Image (spheres, rainbow, N blue to C red):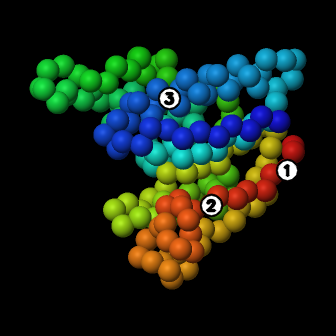
Amino acid sequence: MAVVNTHLYSHKDFPDTKLWQSLFLLRAVDAFVNRARESLPLLLAGDLNSGPESSVYELLATQAVNPRHPDLVPRVAANGFGATNVLPDARAITHRLPLASAYAAVQGAEPEFTNYTLGFRGVLDYVWFDSTHLRCAAVAAIPPVAALTRAGDALPNPQFPSDHTALVADFLFN
C-alpha cells in the first residue's frame, strides 16, 4: 500500500499553482503505484488548500479539469502586463488514478468544513483513496461547532491544537 500526504500552497489567489502541484504529485504517485505488474492500493491525504469547487478537487475526482474551469482563466499580473499563470492546454491536465474522496463516498458530500478560523471556514483537507483497491467503510464525524468553540471562538484553541479538524477514515481492501 502507498500512503501519500501533502500540503499544497495556501495562497487563495494562486489556484493554478495548486493545480500544477496536484498534477505533478498525481503523475509521480501514478508512476510509483503502477511501476510493477500489479498496482499498489493508494491513500492520498492532506491539506490541499482547495475547496470542492476548485480545479484541484475536480482533477482528483474526475481525472481531468474542464477547460472552462474558472481556475484556468489567465490572471493579469500585478503590473498590468500579461498573464501570470502558465498552464498547459486543459486537455493535458489529466491523470489515470481512480480516486474517490472518503468523506464524500461515505456521507454523500464533503463535510461543511475542515478548517475553522475567524477568517475562514471551509473544506481544505481530504482523504482520497484508490477506488479499485479500497472501499471506505466509515469516516469520523467532524466535531460540531459548539464543541470546537467551547474553548475559544475558532481553531486553534486550548482544546484543539490546529486550525484544521482531524480526518479519520476506515478502509477495507476490495
User: x, y (%) of residue 73?
Assistant: 29, 30
Q: For numbered disc 1, what is the local secondary structure?
A: strand
Q: Which mark is residue 21?
A: 3
Q: Nearer the viewer, mark 1 or mark 3?
A: 3
Whether residue 5 is situated above or below residue 97 in the rendered picture = below
Residue 171 horizontal side relative to residue 60, left or right:
right
Front-most of 47 and 132?
Answer: 47
Q: Earlier in the sequence, mark 1 or mark 2?
A: 2
* Label 2 neighbour load within 10 Å: few <14, some 14-19, many 20+: some
Residue 75 location, quadrant: top left
Residue at far front of view: 158
CA gap between label 1 and label 2 equals 20 Å
Q: Earlier in the sequence, mark 3 or mark 2?
A: 3
The residue wearing badge 1 is 172
Question: Total number of numbered labels?
Answer: 3
What residue do we see at 34% from left, 62% from top?
119
User: x, y (%) of residue 87?
Assistant: 38, 20
Q: Quadrant of the N terminus?
A: top right
Visible residue check, residue 67 = yes
The residue wearing badge 2 is 166
CA gap between label 1 and label 3 equals 29 Å
Residue 17 horizontal side relative to residue 47, left or right:
left
Q: Amino acid at mark 3?
A: Gln
What residue do we see at 54% from left, 41% from top?
7
Q: Which mark is residue 60?
A: none
Whether residue 153 is situated above or below residue 60 in the rendered picture = below
Q: For numbered disc 3, what is the local secondary structure?
A: helix
Residue 168 location, quadrant: bottom right
